[in-house]
């Protein structure tokens, strides 16, 4: 293996110790940071994600509430739960687990969360702040990915960064964060002509597509930082990323594993965003 492993578990363990210290400081002041997660329906992957978020909260001493709603929940019922959490002083972060069942309007639901408690960073106000370079809540997955890139120690200024995927929750905020670090950023998507010609130029390559083994070794520049956001199940039911890890690790300079990479860091950043929200709330008390 030529690439250095960017170990999300190791980094998270270290970061969570610091988050737990911040939680303890807040508790001394009579504030216990609280995260509420709303899960609608029975999606098995979402159930695992919600359980992992609850475990993360327990690990750092945060209060956590999981509101599990049936598949046939109406938009009005969902928004009613969000409004109640907005008004609940023991809750500093609110997260609506996506995807929602098809009959529900995700954008409308996310817009109901007060921006200060939007620890996922998906509210248009927080997305707009990121776009405008203003301080706000940054979406957890790209924030975690940036922390992993930062830990390579590579000076990003002037580097070519290529993000494959343009979703609001990963691709777009990721591109903005790389731009803030003075990378020259290219965003690729399903209509990109000659994808490999772009990815081969990348000093930093972020894959957020949702297709197993999509990024192959011949698409990667030797020595590149390769960040694999994808979470997919292969034919054997094993969780794998978007990058052909075994082959790409022989070409890349740094690579994130799946599992134990960006996914782990995403939850750590959620905990960090929640403790930050609680710190802001404590200051404004
Ligand atoms: P979306 O489905 O919203 O976006 C996928 C993106 O990939 C789209 O922009 C799409 O382009 C692009 N794409 C699809 N096919 C191709 C192709 N052939 N060539 C180039 N681009 C293509 O997914 P998300 O952004 O929500 O998630 C991406 C992956 O990351 C998934 O595997 C998801 O499970 C995972 N994920 C992991 C998280 C973590 O914590 N690690 C958190 C969130 C997501 P177009 O816009 O043109 O359709």
Image (cartoon, grey):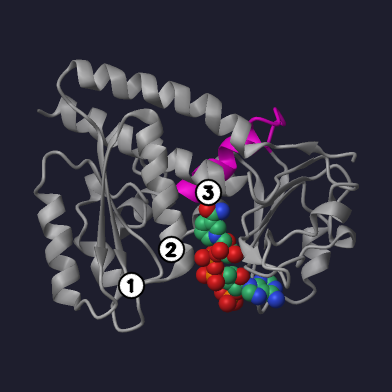
- Image quarter where ligand 1 lies: bottom right
Q: Is residue 145 magenta?
A: yes
User: Circle 1 sits on which residue?
Assistant: 41
Cβ at disc 2 under 8 Å from ligand 1 = no
Please give the label number shown on residue 142.
3
Please give the label number shown on residue 46.
2
**Picture residue at 17% right of the left edge, 17% below the top:** 29
- 271 to the left or right of 250: left
Q: Quadrant of residue 77?
A: bottom left
- Magenta extent: 140-157
Q: Is residue 5 magenta?
A: no
Q: Mark 1 or 3, which is nearer the eye? A: 1
Which of these two is toward me, 205 or 10? 10
User: Which quarter of the figure is the C terminus placed in?
Assistant: top left
- 268 to the left or right of 162: left
Which of disc 3 and disc 1 is earlier in sequence? 1
Mark 2 and 1 residues: CB-CB less than 8 Å, in contact?
yes
**Picture residue at 46% right of the left edge, 22% below the top:** 17
Estimate the spatial distance between the alpha carbons at disc 2 and disc 3, rounded to whole Å.
Answer: 19 Å
Q: Residue furthest bottom?
A: 103
**Picture residue at 36% right of the left edge, 82% below the top:** 102
């Amino acid at each position: 293996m030529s690439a250095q492993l960017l170990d999300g578990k190791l980094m998270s363990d270290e970061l969570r110790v610091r988050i737990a210290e911040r939680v303890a400081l807040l508790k001394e002041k009579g504030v216990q940071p609280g995260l509420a997660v709303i899960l609608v329906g029975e999606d098995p992957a979402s159930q695992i994600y919600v359980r992992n978020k609850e475990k993360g909260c327990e690990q750092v001493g945060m209060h956590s509430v999981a509101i599990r709603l049936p598949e046939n929940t109406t938009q009005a019922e969902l928004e009613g739960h969000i409004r109640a959490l907005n008004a609940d002083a023991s809750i500093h972060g609110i997260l609506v687990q996506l995807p929602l069942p098809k009959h529900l309007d995700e954008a409308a639901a996310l817009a109901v969360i007060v921006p200060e408690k939007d620890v996922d960073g998906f509210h248009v106000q927080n997305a707009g702040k990121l776009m405008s370079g203003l301080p706000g809540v940054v979406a957890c997955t790209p924030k975690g990915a940036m922390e992993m890139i930062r830990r390579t120690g590579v000076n990003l200024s002037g580097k070519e960064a290529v993000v494959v995927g343009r979703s609001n929750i990963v691709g777009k905020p990721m591109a903005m964060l790389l731009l803030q670090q003075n990378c020259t950023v290219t965003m690729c998507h399903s209509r990109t002509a000659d994808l490999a010609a772009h990815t081969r130029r990348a000093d930093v390559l972020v894959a957020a597509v949702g297709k197993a083994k999509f990024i192959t070794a011949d698409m990667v520049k030797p020595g590149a930082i390769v960040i694999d956001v994808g979470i997919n199940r292969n034919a054997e039911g094993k969780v794998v990323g978007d990058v052909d890890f075994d082959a790409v690790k022989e070409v890349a300079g740094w690579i994130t594993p799946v599992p134990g990479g960006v996914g782990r860091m995403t939850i750590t950043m959620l905990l960090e965003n929640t403790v930050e929200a609680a710190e802001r709330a404590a200051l404004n008390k």
